[in-house]
Image (spheres, rainbow, N blue to C red):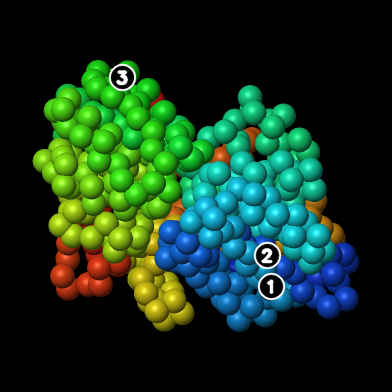
Amino acid sequence: MTSLTRRSALALLPAAGFAAAASRSARAADKTLTIGVNLPMTGAAADTANLIRYGVKAAVDELNGRGGVAGYTLNLLVLDDATSTAGQYDPGQAATNARKMISDPSVIAAIGPMNSGSAKAMCPILSAAGLAIITPSATNPDMTDPKFAAVYRPGELVFFRTVTTDAYQGPSLANYFYDVLKLKSVCILDDSGAYGVGLADRFEAQARKRGLQVLARDRIDPKQADYSAVLSRFKALNPGALYMGGDQLAGVKVVKQSYEIIPNVVKGGGDGFYTPEILTGGGFPAAEGWYATIASPHVTEDSAIEPWVKSFTAIAGRAPSDYSITAYDGTMVIADAISRAAAAGSVTRATVRAAIQTAKVKTLQGEVSFDANGDLASRVVSVFQIHRNDAYPLGDAIHQFKYIGPAPEVT
């Protein structure tokens, strides 16, 4: 999408549609609606989750500042799916949160979860109740794969994404390692979670397809402290690269320990590594040079949305991540759905869900629309490399992750 088009998108966000006639249902008496938000607000990924939460808050503040959506004021119900036992997101808690959303009649749709493990726990519950949810960051393909519909879609299609899936994110970095970096071999780790395993599986399959030799594949427990044994085994194989599928809880330890044991190999991961925690927890020089991908276009440095970035920074006290934007965009898609449902005469979970499925909304990242399974039509994956910039805070992802460009296309 060109800068001109993004400017047009920004201009259109407050345009006609949100002033549609008020609904004759869905809490018509008090004219409020609630958007549920499920994120790991505590634990290993709290910084990343807060950046996503502020993306939702920025959208809701903007919409309410214009008088609401179709006459409705929007509220947020923010639920934490992290537990002290897990140290990060906990699928069991995510399932509990899904039930809380369903039990609140004001909740019309939801944003989240951040993690694929939580998404797998929430999807069957929300589907049975017909409550739509848009994830800004959960990328495991299973939830929208038709062959798993009986598992994750026992009722309505309710799970949508404003990011692409690991069917593209994992293979994209395998292509980059092979096509651009000309690497010959790799060792692969995953953190045993739904996201990490799925991402590593798809990276491995594409690596083998392209001729990148996979010397070893191993699995680690994110709660363990010491990964030196597996990393030492990798060292003995003399790999050209290390790829890690996983989140921050294991990721920060892999960053530190791989620097000590295999410092001179190329290292990379998925969007679980494009986080403030990898920078602050992994530290420098250990994090220097790591590659990371995100499952969306990179737009935080686009001059066309600079006013939005400044506004977000004023609200959050820090610069946004690209997943702050996918969360903001997802909230705007819900707002558009409420507006169209109201114009048709009825704002209910069912009518809003149906309107989300047919969305074509101009957003900060471009037009958001979904395929028949709820996946984002766009399949852009962006590649970054960590390079320390002393002029900015250590956890400032915009300035510590250098944008390389879109990943080679996966066909």
Q: Considering only vertical position in the picture, is 215 above or below 127?
A: above
Image-based side of 177 in relation to 124, left or right: left
Residue 152 seen in this snapshot: yes
The answer to whether marks 2 and 3 mark residues whose Cβ atoms lie closer than 8 Å is no
Question: How many neighbours does mark 3 have within 10 angstroms: few (below 14), some (14-19), or many (20 or more)?
Answer: few
Earlier in the chain: of badge 1 and badge 2, it is 2
Total tally of numbered discs in the picture: 3
Residue 28 horizontal/vertical position (percent) = 86, 71
Earlier in the chain: of badge 2 and badge 3, it is 2
Residue 213 horizontal/vertical position (percent) = 23, 20
Q: Which residue is mark 1?
A: 74
The disc placed on residue 208 is 3
Q: Considering only vertical position in the picture, is 35 above or below 85?
A: below
Residue 143 horizontal/vertical position (percent) = 60, 37
Going 76% across and 40% down the picture, which residue do you hit? 156
Q: Which residue is mark 2?
A: 35
The disc placed on residue 65 is none
- How many angstroms separate mark 2 from mark 3 (CA)? 43 Å
- How many angstroms separate mark 3 from mark 1 (CA)? 48 Å
Going 49% across and 51% down the picture, which residue do you hit? 137
Residue 334 seen in this snapshot: no
Residue 40 horizontal/vertical position (percent) = 53, 60
Quarter of the view holding residue 74: bottom right
Question: How many neighbours does mark 2 have within 10 angstroms: few (below 14), some (14-19), or many (20 or more)?
Answer: many
Name which residue type carries label 2.
Answer: Ile
Disc 2 secondary structure class: strand
Name which residue type carries label 1.
Answer: Leu
- How many angstroms separate mark 1 from mark 2 (CA)? 7 Å
Residues 383 and 355: in front is: 383
> Nearer the observer, disc 2 or disc 3?
3
Image-based side of 265 in relation to 51, left or right: left
